[in-house]
């Protein structure tokens, strides 16, 4: 999971997710160096959402640097189980200054997780997308936490902001951000149409539909693909396309 230092003078650490003590120590030292050498002081930890690979390093970083934690309300509720207390709730569409001339807009982007947030560095048209998109693989939409309708809406809403660069939680930086977001959304709808066609052929269970819809993927990840099909079926019911 990528961890970012977002901001200029007063900056925030986004998603310290590593559970590895050595990586946690390296992160703490890197943040000290960012302060002394670059004048970028970490003032808080921001979370995109509650999944373990995004929060596993929070307590260690808090202990080391005494940083408060900020997240969406729904994320705050979920991370309590991991012993993490959220000190500040981040609200959709609020703008926070992370250094002179560095406004960051908080964006609620549910779908992958109910409390998922993305962060837009407005003057740079740069979107820290969390798990809204990945440069490495398909993002899992796993009901009931995951919701395909919300996910598709979030993709469209972020594309409509016309970002230029994406900093995803997994994989390298992506250019042509708006086009990439629209491509991901189009691909999901294409996959959903294939699910619908399989339904029209009389197939009802995700395990039955899977070989027709995900014929290109290895069997070892079929269990994850079944969850995607379930999410698509729920969305099709929501739309009234199936009963």
Image: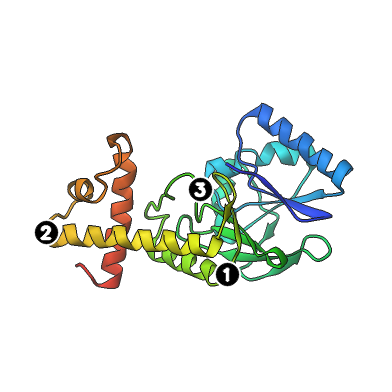
From the viewer's perspective, tell me whether residue 156 is left or right of residue 94.
left
Dot 2: within a 10 Å radius of its alpha carbon, few (fewer than 14), some, or many (20 or more) residues?
few
In the rendering, at what x and y percent does residue 132 appear? 50, 56
> Image quarter for residue 152?
bottom left
Quarter placement of the N terminus? top right
Q: CA distance from mark 2 to mark 1?
A: 39 Å
Task: Work out whether mark 1 precedes mark 3 in sequence or the reverse, and give the earlier one.
Answer: 3
- Residue at the spot 63% in from the left edge and 47% down from the top edge: 15
Q: Which mark is residue 135?
A: 3
Q: CA distance from mark 1 to mark 3?
A: 18 Å
- Residue at the spot 41% in from the left edge and 49% down from the top edge: 140
Q: Which element is circle 2 on?
A: loop
Asked whether disc 3 touches disc 2, contact meaning CB atoms under 8 Å apart, the reply is no
In the rendering, at what x and y percent does residue 95 appear? 71, 69
> Image quarter for residue 118?
bottom right
Q: Which element is circle 3 on?
A: loop
Looking at the image, the residue that sits furthest to the left is: 202
Asked whether disc 1 touches disc 3, contact meaning CB atoms under 8 Å apart, the reply is no
Q: Which element is circle 1 on?
A: loop
Q: Can you identify the residue that label 1 sits on?
A: 162
Residue 198 in view of the camera: yes
From the viewer's perspective, tell me whether residue 7 is left or right of residue 57.
right
Nearer to me, 107 or 70: 107
Quarter placement of the C terminus? bottom left
Dot 1: within a 10 Å radius of its alpha carbon, few (fewer than 14), some, or many (20 or more) residues?
some
Q: CA distance from mark 3 to mark 2?
A: 34 Å
Residue 151 in view of the camera: no
Task: Work out whether mark 2 precedes mark 1 in sequence or the reverse, and give the earlier one.
Answer: 1
Q: Can you identify the residue that label 2 sits on?
A: 201
């Amino acid at each position: 999971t990528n961890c970012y230092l977002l901001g200029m003078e007063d900056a925030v650490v986004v998603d310290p997710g590593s559970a590895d003590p050595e990586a946690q120590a390296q992160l703490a030292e890197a943040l000290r160096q960012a302060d002394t050498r670059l004048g970028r002081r970490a003032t808080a930890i921001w979370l995109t959402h509650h999944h373990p690979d995004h929060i596993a390093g929070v307590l260690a970083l808090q202990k080391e640097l005494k940083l408060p934690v900020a997240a969406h309300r729904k994320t705050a509720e979920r991370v309590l189980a991991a012993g993490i207390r959220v000190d500040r709730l981040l609200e959709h569409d609020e703008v926070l200054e992370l250094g002179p001339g560095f406004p960051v807009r908080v964006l609620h982007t549910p779908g992958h997780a109910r409390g998922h947030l993305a962060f837009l560095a407005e003057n740079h048209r740069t979107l820290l997308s969390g798990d809204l998109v990945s440069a490495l693989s398909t993002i899992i939409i796993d009901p009931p936490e995951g919701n395909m309708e919300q996910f598709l809406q979030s993709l469209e809403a972020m594309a409509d902001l016309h970002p230029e660069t994406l900093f995803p939680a997994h994989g390298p930086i992506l250019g042509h951000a708006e086009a990439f977001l629209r491509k991901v959304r189009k691909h999901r709808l294409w996959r959903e149409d294939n699910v619908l066609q399989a339904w029209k052929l009389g197939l009802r269970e995700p395990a039955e539909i899977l070989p027709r819809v995900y014929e290109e993927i290895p069997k070892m990840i079929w269990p994850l693909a079944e969850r995607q099909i379930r999410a698509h079926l729920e969305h099709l019911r929501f739309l009234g396309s199936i009963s």
